[in-house]
Amino acid sequence: RPWDWSVVVLVALREQWNSIQGSNGVLFRRPQQAPLTSNLAPSSIQSKQELLGPVKELVWKFPKVQEEPVQPDFNFKLQQPRPSDSVAVQCWENGVHVEVKQDFFGTGQLLEPSLLSLGGCAVVNVDAAAKVLIFHSALQECGSQFMVTENELVYIFTLDYRPAAFQSTPIVRSSGATVGIKCHYPRRHNVSSNEVQPAWIPYASTQVAEDILAFSLKIMTDDWMFERPSNVFFLGDVLNIQASVKQYNHVPLRIFVDNCVATRDPNVKSAPMYSFIENHGCLTDAKYTGSISKFLPRVQDDKLQFQLEAFRFQQESSGAIYITCLLKASAASAQVDENHKSCSFRANGNEVCGCCDTSCGLRTDSVLTKVPGFQWEGKAQVGPLQVWEIQLKAKNVI
């Protein structure tokens, strides 16, 4: 009987398909065909292979943002400021003599003579060498109050200090104070000066940007080793502030502090508001207030440290402060320019800081944007910080 060559060809093709499926790990499906009959010519037989998909599973995943490492426990002690012996009094037979240190709170900040008064009377003399302000008053003048007891005649004076906000700012770096002064005179004895007992009356987080960049703002300890566990400060203290950026799967970056404002609540548009870094990295606080605030020399591209002298808002009893900064990150290989700089008022040796007294580059109101030229921006905030006032005491000079 003659061979049916069409059947032979089909059997051979089926064996070849099975071999391909086993060796390549790829699954093929043969489409339905009409039943084969002996009267079909070999050239009329057709088939189609359909690729159903690879067997191997895709294992790549988008990188995850790493968690912040847990800060170890360490011994931190809040340093309480010592009361300042700033007022000395001599009670004379017909008057009172008061001497007041210009470093009224013992913080190194000299007070303006016009801000102090003895019962409404101004300073009569200034000892510039000793930095002492001098008041004189007759017993019945300068708002004195007279009181009689069984054994004494008492004249009471009030020394007032009322801080004024720095020009063009809403902040103060000293607290208002009222010191009570009493001169005691025995009714049947010679005049004497007893120790003065003054009365102290005080005036009543991290943003993640695009491309997995994490900006942060932290208050650090004095040695810059740890994040400071306490948010309490005193007037005269220095805030150590560190801005940083964490990068994941990214080119090396350098961080800058573009601008910073202080407010009494988290809303950066609330009043009062004090801007102390502006003009793309100009730390202007020292210029406005004569403080020691400054940027520190950079030790890492992804970290920037600066110091800010503590302050309070004028006529704000809580002492609460929030600090909000716009942080920038650019490629570490990029050149420092007017839009990317860190300038302190008394140390502007870099030529890019020359614009701090005028206008530097173009300003953006965005708080979280990516702009051309490998630059990223993000907002970061710390607070509330509590800035407390300093106590002081007076003593008599006999």
Image (cartoon, helix red, strand yellow):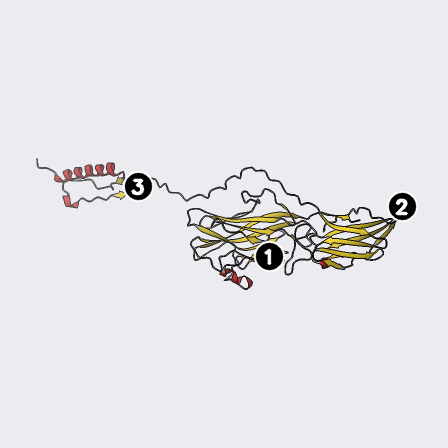
The answer to whether one can see residue 335 in this image is yes
Mark 1 or 3: the one toward you: 1
Q: Is disc 2 placed on a helix, strand or loop?
A: loop
Tell which circle, 1 or 3, labels the residue nearer the N-terminal end. Answer: 3
Q: Is disc 1 placed on a helix, strand or loop?
A: helix
Q: Quadrant of the N terminus?
A: top left
Give the residue pinned by disc 2.
Answer: 151
At 60% from the left edge and 40% from the top edge, which residue is drawn? 76
Q: Which mark is residue 32?
A: none
Tell which circle, 2 or 3, labels the residue nearer the N-terminal end. Answer: 3
Judge the density around disc 3: few (<14), some (14-19), many (≥20) Cα neighbours within 10 Å. few
Query: Does the residue at mark 2 contact the one at mark 1 (Cβ under 8 Å)?
Result: no
Residue that lies at the very extreme toward the top in this rendered image: 1
Give the residue pinned by disc 1.
Answer: 286
**Residue 58 or residue 342, whichever sits in front:** 342
Left or right, residue 326 beside residue 49: right
The answer to whether one can see residue 266 in this image is no
Give the residue pinned by disc 3.
Answer: 54
Query: Does the residue at mark 1 contact the one at mark 3 (Cβ under 8 Å)?
Result: no
Tell which circle, 2 or 1, labels the residue nearer the N-terminal end. Answer: 2
Judge the density around disc 1: few (<14), some (14-19), many (≥20) Cα neighbours within 10 Å. some
Left or right, residue 191 beside residue 57: right
Residue 351 lies, in percent from the top left, at 49, 61
Residue that lies at the very extreme toward the right in this rendered image: 188
The amino acid marked with disc number 2 is Asn
Residue 271 lies, in percent from the top left, at 63, 56
The amino acid marked with disc number 1 is Ala
Residue 208, above or below 55: below
The amino acid marked with disc number 3 is Pro
Disc 2 from disc 3: Cα separation: 107 Å
Residue 53 lies, in percent from the top left, at 30, 42
Residue that lies at the very extreme toward the front in this rendered image: 129
